[in-house]
Amino acid sequence: MSSSTLSLTKAKDLAIDFIKKYKDALRNGANGLPVNDSDIAKYEKMTPFDFFNEVTVQANFGSYFNLFDVRWTTNSKLPQIWMGEHSTINDLNKKIAKNSGSDESLRHFYQMDGTWYNLTEARLEALGKILDQLCAKPTVKTAKKSSKKPVKKPEVVVTISDTTEVQNEIAFVNFDAKKFEHALQQGGTNFDPMVSNERDNSASNQIDHAINAFKLAKKELDTFISELVKAKEAGAKYVVDTDWCERKDFNFKK
């Protein structure tokens, strides 16, 4: 199991093999649909750089983070993989084992505690372990039919997160939440590119600050989309900004 950084060509071959193996656990980020044979055929025809730069293959759970990306350096372009934070491969395997006690813990480690690393065979194998657990199909039990008439359930509030609630087919979302600051406020309150004089340049419009701000925005958008998807699964058909009207003040009468 190699832990050395791979060339784009070798990395693409391994990534394609990985996608084929875990196809049922992945989705095409461009359209939100499960990865299919047509998608894979398209990926195989792409150049290694275009594959890592353009393709958005995502794990079909949680916040739908992209699996692969590419990092530019002065002299090269390096294939990247999203993985939970770690210092060494041994540390990574220990953290996966530690968090595998529950799907929620493992998902949080992989996505919310993650960042981009150089793609290696060892990290790709670790990603396989994560998908093996989080994408395993649950055993479905057939419910017995009942002769009793169904009881109409009372209207309830479904809490999706600390920023999203669902009631009566409406998702009430706090668009001003701090955790969405970078995504919904054009890079966050500390990023300010609105300057018209060289002497006004400062840390707030420094290029590395901009890059980091929008990397955070990307993660926040994944979380935001995930919460909206969960709200839809909970019955939501519409979205209301709670800064305009809170759920308790909304007129549900048609």
Image (cartoon, grey):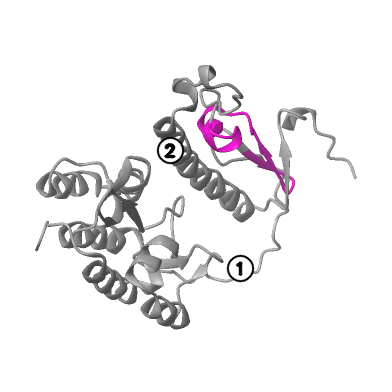
* First along the sequence among labels 2 and 1: 1
Residue 220 badge: none
Q: Tell whether 254 sits left or right of 65.
A: right
Residue linked to disc 2:
211
Q: Is residue 23 above or below residue 232?
A: below
Q: Quadrant of residue 108?
A: top left
**Residue 186 included in the magenta stretch of the image:** yes
Depth check, front residue: 63 or 149: 63
Can residue 139 be seen by looking at this rendering?
Answer: no
Depth check, front residue: 247 or 90: 90
Which secondary structure, mark 2? helix
Q: Tell whether 240 sits left or right of 15.
A: right
Which secondary structure, mark 1? loop
Residue type at the position of mark 1: Ser
Span of residues in magenta = 165-187
Q: Is residue 239 above or below residue 118?
A: above
Quarter of the image for the C terminus: give it. Answer: top right
Q: Please provide percent x and percent y for residue 77.
A: 29, 56
Q: Please provide percent x and percent y for residue 205.
A: 49, 27
Residue linked to disc 1:
146
How many numbered badges does the structure rendering display? 2
Count neighbours of disc 2 (C-alpha within 10 A) and say few if under 14, some if 14 to 19, many if 20 or more: few
- How far apart, in angstroms, are the residues tagged by discs 2 and 1? 57 Å
Q: Quadrant of residue 132?
A: bottom left
Q: Please provide percent x and percent y for residue 45.
A: 39, 80
In front: label 2 or label 1: 2
Can residue 141 be seen by looking at this rendering?
Answer: yes
Q: Please provide percent x and percent y for residue 245.
A: 77, 30
At x 45% / y 55%, what residue is drawn? Answer: 64
Depth check, front residue: 7 or 232: 7
